[in-house]
Image: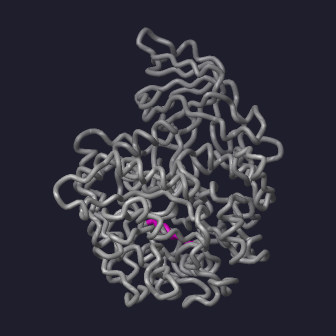
Amino acid sequence: MPHADLLLTGGVVYAGPGRGAVPGTSACGSAPAPLEVAVVDGRIAAVAPDLADWRGPDTVVHDLEGGMLHAGFVDAHIHPIQGGLERLGCDLSEGSTAADYGRIIASYAALNPPRGCDASRAWITGGGWAMSAFPGGTPTAAALDDIEPIRPVFLYNRDHHGAWANSAALALAGITADTPDPADGRIERLPDGRPSGTLHEGAAALVAAVAPAATPDDEYAALLEAQRYALSLGITGWQDAIVGDYFGASDTALVYRRALAEGRLAVDVVGALWWDRARGVEQLPELVARRERHAAELGPGSRFRLAAVKIMADGVVENGTAAMLDPYLGAVASAEHPAGIAFVGGQALTDAIVAIDAAGFSAHVHAIGDRAVREALDGFAAARAANGWSTPGRHCIAHLQVVHPDDVPRFAELGVVANAQALWAANEPQMRELTVPVLGPERAAHQYPFASIARATVPFAGADAGRDAPPRLAAGSDWPVSTPDPWQAIHVAVNRRHPEDDADFDPEPLLPHEALALAEALDAYTAGSAWLNGRGSSDSGAGAPSGVIEVGAVADLAATDRDPFAGPAASIHSTRTVATWIAGRRVHG
């Protein structure tokens, strides 16, 4: 018997889906058990109650101290370089009120004075503000002018579907009362038509085009900061949901390449290439060429792969740009697009998905509204009809805020993974004040139906019964839209409410029948997302199972300070990651 390089003992082990059902959960549920894990050459070599025989003179023994060991998290939808840039810039994510944001901006401006003689060109950029902090979700340029009247200020909101600009930034972008709304966005206006300071969707690009772009060194520093932060949360891999020319962003594939070349990329990454919504299928050969060039240069088994294509089918509900089957209610109903905006929809979306699938890419579709979700599923149905079930793509629809009940079983029928951002499925202020009023009670009852999708009785309908069937759910954060801490999202997935104990804000759970069991939520964030990223498949080059703890699996692992299964569901959010390993090498804790 070989000696272990690493032996993990003194706690419980959550092995993953299909490894011991828990009463009251779906069939895939599992329970943690008091086990030990031995790691040899980056793979799990043994899992058993007592592995004393695996100890050798050079074995590193880690005591879990009563905590839980689980497979490392894989974030299935994240923007890490963007998140890193915000952490290094004017980061508003820790605030929650207009007063909070004012203090943070003023402090940042004081600590980061302009350099050189032209202060008007020394921009303040960043983001992370919540729409719920402002009446109607629309902060004003005047409020920013009171804090910083000279330097241009440009700050994205948390969901990055809108931005807040001061008068100096609007002037540099040439946005006036005479500036028309772009086809894919809207400029909020004062009664006289002048811009008020909030820019939705494509309108934000008007300012982004004149704001200083992040330098390659800025982006590299942001990636390293994002990776450090992710590893501290037990995240060992992710799918970067936009790699490419998005609102003037540079090709971040080169940032990952630099990290690889310098030996500093620790996590496993799939990059989703951006689908230019102003173009059609004629762009696909360019994306294929990029994938093949990177694959040839990096070789098999690389930690960075361009294996997916990201399509943003619509916007978000709060600003009326999510594509809905029926018009919005209230003031949004009188807007130019009363049922939202399909950035890529109808036949254009179907053509894109069919072509992406045929090219062997995984299609990663952002869909918030029920029309966008339906049209994406229609596209996947057309792809199955045109291309069959043998293409290697691992497809998903992300966000899934409003899903018509008729479309719930179609995910399993078509082998499409529901990519859940569960932290949003709660009765928080934005939901109550901005979302439900424009949806109405009937559609609001169709939000984030994760349990319905996970437990649909429809079996996987692939022609090859022996094929590795997709999981029903994967999970991600959409950071910097919301925190990348998986335990916060898992808490909401199980409780359908945020963990705040403020007596003034004690809402009912959001549609509690859609709550997941803890095992289901943890499986989605580990095995489900690992499958989506192709770990353990021949196309990834990994060649070993991932997202689970079993003999032969990659030893990407995380340890917590407690067994969250042993405590009340209301305390899941208190779980903390204390150590993280990638291929058996300790990278945090």
Q: Percent x, y for residue 545?
A: 51, 43
Q: In the figure, residue 14 lies in which quadrant?
A: top right
Magenta span main SS? strand
Residue at figure coordinates x 66%, y 70% from the top left: 434
Q: Residue furthest top?
A: 57
Q: 125 and 369: which one is in front? A: 125
Residue at figure coordinates x 55%, y 38% from the top left: 71
Rendered view: 137 above or below 541 = below
Q: Answer left or right for 404 relative to 337.
A: right
Q: 317 and 21: which one is in front? A: 317
Q: Percent x, y for residue 368?
A: 59, 72
Q: 435 and 234: which one is in front? A: 435
Q: Is residue 92 visible?
A: yes
Q: Percent x, y for residue 377?
A: 59, 76
Residue at figure coordinates x 32%, y 79% from the top left: 283
Q: 304 and 108: which one is in front? A: 108
Q: Is residue 393 visible?
A: no
Residue 475 magenta-drawn?
A: no
Rendered view: 494 above or below 198 = above
Range of magenta residues: 362-367
Q: Percent x, y for residue 366?
A: 52, 70
The image's colouring method is: one colour
How many numbered discs, if any?
0
Q: In the figure, residue 576 lies in which quadrant?
A: top right
Q: Answer left or right for 555 relative to 416.
A: left
Rendered view: 32 above or below 507 = above
Q: Residue furthest left?
A: 117
Rendered view: 570 above or below 3 = below
